[in-house]
Amino acid sequence: MRKICIVVGSRANYSSIKSVMLAVRERKDLQLQLVVTASALLERYGSPVQLMEKDGFTPAATVHTLIEGETPLTMAKSTGLGLLEISQVFHGLAPDVVVTVGDRFETLATAIASAYMNIPLAHTMGGEVTGTIDESIRHAVTKLAHIHFPANDAAAQRIIRMGEDPSAVFTVGCPRMDIVSAIAAKHANPEGQEMLALEGVGGKLDFSKPYLVVMQHPVTTEYERSAEHMRQTLEAIEELHMPTAFFWPNADAGSEDIAREIRKFRERNDDSYIHFYKNLPLESFIPLLLRCACMVGNSSAGIREGAFLGVPVVNIGTRQAGRDRGANVIDTDYDRRAIVDAVRKQMAHGPYQRNAAYGDGKAGKRIADILATAPLRVQKRLAY
C-alpha cells in the first residue's frame, strides 16, 4: 500500500485537492496522509481545517508555519519555517509520495523538503502562466517535482518545454472542477440565504436579486499598492450599490493593507448591502457563484470556476495575467470607472457558455489511479 501525503496550506488548496483526497481514500491500495499547515489552520482565514474534518478527513499532522505580518519578509520567513517543520513531519510519516498544490509559499517549502528527503513529489496545477511571484514558485516546484498533473494541454506543453520527462506529465484537468461539477449538477440554489447569513458579517443579502461576488487578493510583486488597489474596487462596488458577497483576502504580502481598507470602508460608508465572508465550503460557494450577476476581483476562481460555470467575470489587474481563460472574462486595470463599466457590460451580457478548459470533472480519480500505479523515482535529468 502506497502512502500518499497530501499537504494543504490554504482554503484554496483544499478546494483544489479535495476530489483527489476523496479518490485516494476510496482506493484500498492507497493510504491518505493529510498534513494541514499555514493559513488553513487559522481562524482569521475561516479555519479551513474544520471544513476538512467536517468532510471526514482527519489530519495526520498539523503544522503551524505562518509568520503573520503579510509582508515579503514574513512570506520568506514562513517558507523557511515551513521547510523546517514540514520536513520533520515527513520524517515521521515516511510517505511514498507527497502531493503539493499550485504555487503558494507553503507549496515551495513542501517541494524542497520532499526533494531533499528523496520522496517522490507530485505537483498539481503546474505549467500555468500568471506573472507575479506565484509563477516563479509554480515553475520552481515543477523543477523539483517528479510527477506532474497539469490542468490542460497548454500547461502540459510548458512543463515539457521546461525539460521535464513527457512520460511523467499527465494532463488530468483541475481537481477543483470535480467538486464544482458535482455541486453544479444538483442545480442548487443559494438556499443558503439562511445558512449564508449565519456565516460572516454584514448586511443580509437578497439572493433573488442580481448580486456580485467579490474576491480580491494582494499581488505580491505589487504588495505596496494593495491598499490603493482595494480602494478602487471598493469605490466601484459603492457606485454599483448592489447586493454583494465580499470575501476576505488570502495570507499573502499586502493582505493586511487590503483588510485595513475594508475596515475603513465599513466605518465610513453604508455597507448594509454587503456581506463579508472569511471562507465558505464549496457546497455553499459554488451555488453562490453560479447564480451571481458578476464576479469581481483577481481570484483564479473567476478564471477556473467562472469559465466552467459560465459566470461573467471582471478580472482586475495583473494577478492572473497570462493565465489561459475563457470568453467569460473581461480584464480591467485598478480603476474605479473601468471596473464599473466592465461590471455593467457583463451584467448586460449575462451568463456565458460553459467552458471545460480546466477539466471535465474527473481529475481526482485519474490522479489517484496514477498515484497508485506510476513508477516512483527521485532521480531527475533534463529530458532534452
Image (cartoon, rainbow, N blue to C red):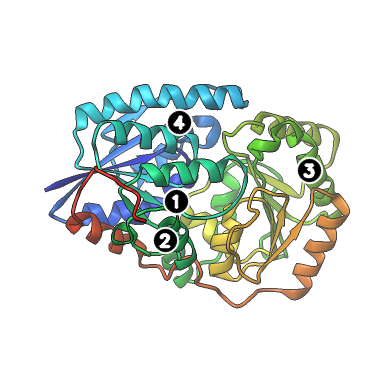
Which residue is disc 2 drawn over? Answer: 179
Where is residue 23? Give x, y as percent.
Answer: 27, 57
CA–CA distance in space, label 2 to label 4:
23 Å
Could you tell which of marks 4 and 3 lies nearer the N-terminus?
Answer: 4
Which residue is disc 3 drawn over? Answer: 271
Could you tell which of marks 2 and 1 lies nearer the N-terminus?
Answer: 1
Q: Looking at this view, is 121 or 237 the one in front?
A: 121
Could you tell which of marks 4 and 1 lies nearer the N-terminus?
Answer: 1
- Residue 78 seen anywhere in this rendered image of the structure: yes
- Vertical order, 196 against 174 (above or below): above
CA–CA distance in space, label 2 to label 3:
32 Å
Circles 2 and 1, Cβ within 8 Å, touching? The answer is yes
Which residue is disc 4 drawn over? Answer: 38
CA–CA distance in space, label 1 to label 3:
29 Å
Q: Looking at this view, is 243 or 360 the one in front?
A: 360
Q: Circle 1 sits in a helix, a strand or a loop, which is it?
A: helix
**Residue flagged by tag 3: what amino acid is it?**
Asp
Left or right: 132, with 271 as reference point: left
Q: Circle 2 sits in a helix, a strand or a loop, which is it?
A: helix
Q: Residues within 10 Å of mark 1 (few under 14, many from 20)?
A: many
Residue lying at 58% horizontally and 38% vertically, measured from the top left: 250
Could you tell which of marks 2 and 4 lies nearer the N-terminus?
Answer: 4
Could you tell which of marks 1 and 3 lies nearer the N-terminus?
Answer: 1
- Residue 190 seen anywhere in this rendered image of the structure: no
- Vertical order, 231 against 374 (above or below): above
Residue lying at 56% horizontally and 54% vertically, measured from the top left: 129
Q: Residues within 10 Å of mark 4 (few under 14, many from 20)?
A: many
